[in-house]
């Protein structure tokens, strides 16, 4: 499987090389969402309060 191809003095991703990039972008976006959810969960009041 060829991921890069030479174009003049440069290299470019082949369609097969672009696939891991798309997958990585999706993974990083999911991690960012999870981190954001975790950060906001600390700001929410939760638990049980008993007044006697």
Image: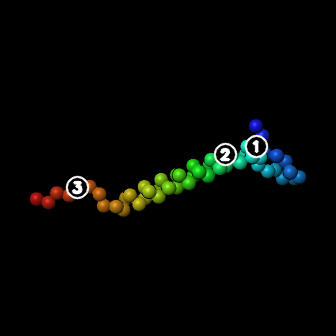
- Disc 2, SS: helix
Q: Residue 49's x, y, as percent?
A: 20, 58
- Disc 3, SS: loop
Residue drawn at x 67%, y 45% is 20
Give yes or no for contact between labels 2 and 1 (Cβ–Cβ under 8 Å): yes
First in sequence: mark 3 vs mark 2: 2
- Determine the CA span between mark 3 and mark 1: 55 Å
Q: For the residue carrying disc 2, how many other residues have a C-alpha within 10 Å: few (<14), some (14-19), or many (20+)?
A: few
Q: For the residue carrying disc 3, how many other residues have a C-alpha within 10 Å: few (<14), some (14-19), or many (20+)?
A: few
- Disc 1, SS: loop
Q: For the residue carrying disc 1, how many other residues have a C-alpha within 10 Å: few (<14), some (14-19), or many (20+)?
A: some
Give yes or no for contact between labels 3 and 2 (Cβ–Cβ under 8 Å): no
The answer to whether residue 34 is left or right of residue 43 is: right
Quadrant assignment for the N terminus: top right
Residue on which the image places disc 2: 20
Labelled disc at residue 48: 3
Q: Quadrant of residue 16?
A: top right
- Determine the CA span between mark 2 and mark 1: 9 Å
Q: Residue 24's x, y, as percent?
A: 62, 48
Quadrant assignment for the C terminus: bottom left
- Determine the CA span between mark 3 and mark 2: 46 Å
Residue drawn at x 67%, y 49% is 21
First in sequence: mark 2 vs mark 1: 1
Residue drawn at x 81%, y 50% is 11
| Residue, far top | 1
Labelled disc at residue 46: none
């Amino acid at each position: 499987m060829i991921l890069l191809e030479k174009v003049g003095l440069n290299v470019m991703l082949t369609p097969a090389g672009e696939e891991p990039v798309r997958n990585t972008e999706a993974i990083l976006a999911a991690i960012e969402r999870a981190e954001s959810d975790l950060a906001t969960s600390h700001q929410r009041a939760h638990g049980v309060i008993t007044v006697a």
